[in-house]
Image (spheres, rainbow, N blue to C red):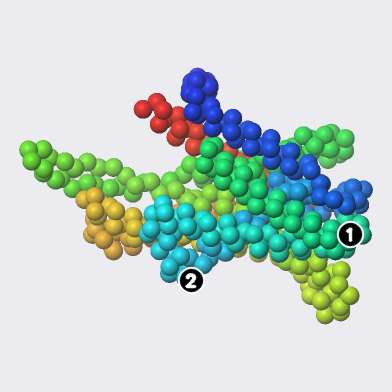
Amino acid sequence: MQNFLNKLKIILEDKSLRKRILFVLLAFVVFRIFSTIPIPGIDALKLEQFLTNNQFFGLLNLFSGGGLSNLSIVMLGVGPYITSSIIMQLLTIMVPKLKAMYHEEGELGRKKFTQYSRLLTVPLALVQGFGLLTLLGRQEILGSLSFFDQILNLAIVTAGSVLVMWLGELISEYGVGNGVSLLIFAGIVAQIPSSISQLAFTFDISQIPLYIAFIVGAIVIIAGVVFITEAERKIPVTYAKRVRGAKMYGGVSTYLPLRVNQAGVIPIIFALSILLFPQMIATFLAGIDNVALQKIASLLGLFIQNLWLYGIFYFLLVFVFTYFYTAVTFDPQSLSTNLQKNGAFIPGIRPGPSTAVHISKILNRITLAGAVFLGAMAVLPIIMQSVTGVQALAIGGTALLIVVSVVIDLIKKLDAQISMREY
């Protein structure tokens, strides 16, 4: 407790750090204001009926930061930007120039890579916005709009998505933590008061065992996420002795920390982005008067409604994306080269390619544990839903996983800022 109070005192007394915190809070306020401004032509009653117990739009609402619940101007949220980032990360495997840009060209290369992701966000926002507005129009939620009004709405939601992307990057640059993750976090937290009030109004004493099970599941997820996020494998590293003039340098031993979960919460977000597509396509095709397309929609609907099949696919996506994101962001070859240039080596392992292979083997083994854990935590709420029959648990569990991971990352960023100022 004393340590927490000391850190809080440093945050309040340090002008620069205080400004960063206030900037994040101000960005949250601006984002929540935007999420309450609806697009024109909404039938509020039909929208409320449509969103009731709709798991697909519940998950989509996570990425919009709560903006989809009232069809706000930022209803797409960070979804297009996340999809753009996924596509660009995939392209680094297939396009050597992009891989070199991301890994070898330093900060300038990463800025160019990010700029390409931003540019790709615009057409993706147009496509996602058109699909979502068409879907909602067929549900008669938007009423009868003219062609000009439809184009206007599409332009508004696309601009809103770009605005949210820009706001997220401002948070990353002038605030603390990852801006995109924090906006998703803000949207989830903003829904907590309404969820609590809804639970209070619908409280049923016969459902107490279910409530206890949900609380236990939440505690398990929180404890598990914290444990896996903090877990790391320490690889011993020794620096060779070097003589410069009359002084001797090196000869010290340290360690290289490899985290069990290098990817954080990103695999969950990636997997959810992919899972949203078949659900959106099924809902979109169901409204078309064509036998073949409606059969495709019914097949996709069977996949969505089969919780076990859906859960297995969800687990596999999280598992694969954990390895994929770790491989993209962590390069053992570059690490081995840097160690060799600085006169460092792993005891018993030859410097160079052998070191890279050794690090890769260790990374693959510990990432296996991280990937299995993330996949298990992701599908645990779905298992609870299949047992209890309560649909909201699947959304709540995923949201809880994202919130805990974002909070842990934010605390680490704040600790880093505080440590830097103490020195």
Along the line of sight, the residue nearer the viewer: 102 or 362: 102
Question: What residue lies at 53% left-to-right and 22% top-to-bottom?
Answer: 12
> x, y (%) of residue 407?
58, 38
22, above or below 387, in the image: above
Q: Residues within 10 Å of mark 2 (few under 14, many from 20)?
A: few
Assign a secondary structure to mark 2.
helix
> x, y (%) of residue 289?
89, 75
Asked whether residue 277 appears in the rendered view, the answer is yes
Along the line of sight, the residue nearer the viewer: 132 or 239: 132
Q: Amino acid at mark 1?
A: Leu
Left or right of 328 on screen, residue 44: right
Question: What residue lies at 76% left-to-right and 58% top-to-bottom?
Answer: 154
361, above or below 416, in the image: below
> x, y (%) of residue 20?
54, 32
> x, y (%) of residue 348?
24, 55
Assign a secondary structure to mark 1.
loop
Asked whether residue 214 appears in the rendered view, the answer is no
Tag shown at residue 94: 2
Quickly name the residue at label 1: 145
Tag shown at residue 401: none
Q: Amino acid at mark 2?
A: Met
Furthest-left residue in view? 246
Q: CA distance from mark 1 to mark 2?
A: 43 Å
